[in-house]
């Protein structure tokens, strides 16, 4: 009899783990503070991140400077990344945020359009990123979860997939520094890096 209850407990625990593996953006609609990209990614920010390979081993770290400009739900987010292996890279996102919380975006190294949805303190969005790889390029699917911790701090968890398999995972924290900051200097730096 005791063996029967033990097996039943193990089965229940296994089912709860399996059913708990998937999440939906709607799971977070009641959580606060509410994430609005045109408020959090406004002005200057700083990000700190760690990339792990498919084995879970730390592969690279980075610090990034960010600056965003918004007008009527349309934004430009400028990013410069400083990697621990010496690389310096840039990205310029052109973003749209609808009144219903739908997010779309494009960038130079994004294939097609990124799409996502805001709910409560979170954003889930997905896109295909073109990465330099072994003298060529490699397209990977990026699945991005962003969770606002408080008005100035956000945690971002990203998984990168190829042929349906997870090939890397990225964890980063982003802090808004000054919502009134001028983006001119970072915008120029992004343009210079892109031109090289």
Image (spheres, grey):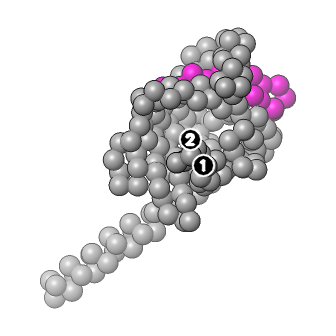
Count of numbered labels shown in the rendering? 2
Q: Nearer the viewer, residue 177 or 63?
A: 63
Q: Position of residue 94 (x, y in %)?
A: 76, 34
Q: Is residue 146 magenta?
A: no
Report which quarter residue 109 is drawn in: top right
Residue located 32% across and 70% down the image: 13
Q: Nearer the viewer, residue 48 or 81?
A: 81
Quarter holding the N terminus? Answer: bottom left
Residue positioned 35% across, 55% down in the render:
55
Q: Residues within 10 Å of mark 2 (few under 14, many from 20)?
A: many
Which label number is shown at residue 146? 2
Furthest residue in direction right, as rendered = 72
Q: CA distance from mark 1 to mark 2?
A: 30 Å
Q: Are marks 1 and 2 in contact (CB under 8 Å)?
A: no
Q: Does dot 1 land on a helix, a strand or a loop?
A: strand
Q: Where 93 sits versus 117, above or below?
A: above
Region in magenta: 63-78
Name the residue rendered at 24%, 81% in the picture: 7
In the image: residue 52, left or right of residue 3: right
Report x, y in % for residue 63.
48, 26
Residue 161 in view in this figure: yes
Q: Which residue is mark 1?
A: 136
Q: Is residue 118 left or right of residue 176?
A: right
- The reply, left or right, for residue 145 in relation to residue 17 is right
Q: Is residue 42 above or below residue 185?
A: below
The image shows residue 53, relative to residue 154, as above or below, that is below
Q: Is residue 71 magenta?
A: yes
Residue 6, given in percent of the width and then of the height, sits at 20, 79
């Amino acid at each position: 009899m005791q063996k029967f209850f033990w097996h039943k407990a193990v089965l229940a625990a296994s089912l709860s783990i399996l059913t708990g593996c998937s999440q939906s953006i709607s799971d977070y609609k009641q959580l606060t503070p509410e994430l609005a990209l045109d408020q959090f990614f406004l002005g200057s920010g700083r990000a700190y991140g760690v990339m792990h390979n498919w084995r879970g081993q730390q592969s690279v770290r980075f610090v990034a400077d960010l600056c965003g400009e918004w007008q009527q739900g349309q934004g430009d987010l400028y990013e410069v990344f400083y990697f621990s292996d010496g690389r310096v890279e840039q990205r310029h996102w052109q973003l749209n945020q609808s009144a219903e919380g739908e997010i779309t975006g494009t960038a130079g190294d994004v294939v097609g359009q990124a799409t996502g949805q805001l709910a409560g303190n979170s954003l889930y969005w997905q896109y295909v990123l073109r990465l330099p790889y072994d003298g060529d390029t490699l397209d990977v699917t990026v699945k991005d979860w962003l969770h606002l911790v408080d008005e100035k701090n956000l945690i971002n968890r990203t998984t990168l997939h190829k042929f349906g398999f997870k090939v890397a995972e990225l964890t980063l924290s982003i802090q808004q520094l000054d919502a009134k900051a001028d983006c001119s200097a970072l915008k120029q730096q992004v343009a210079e890096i892109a031109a090289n």
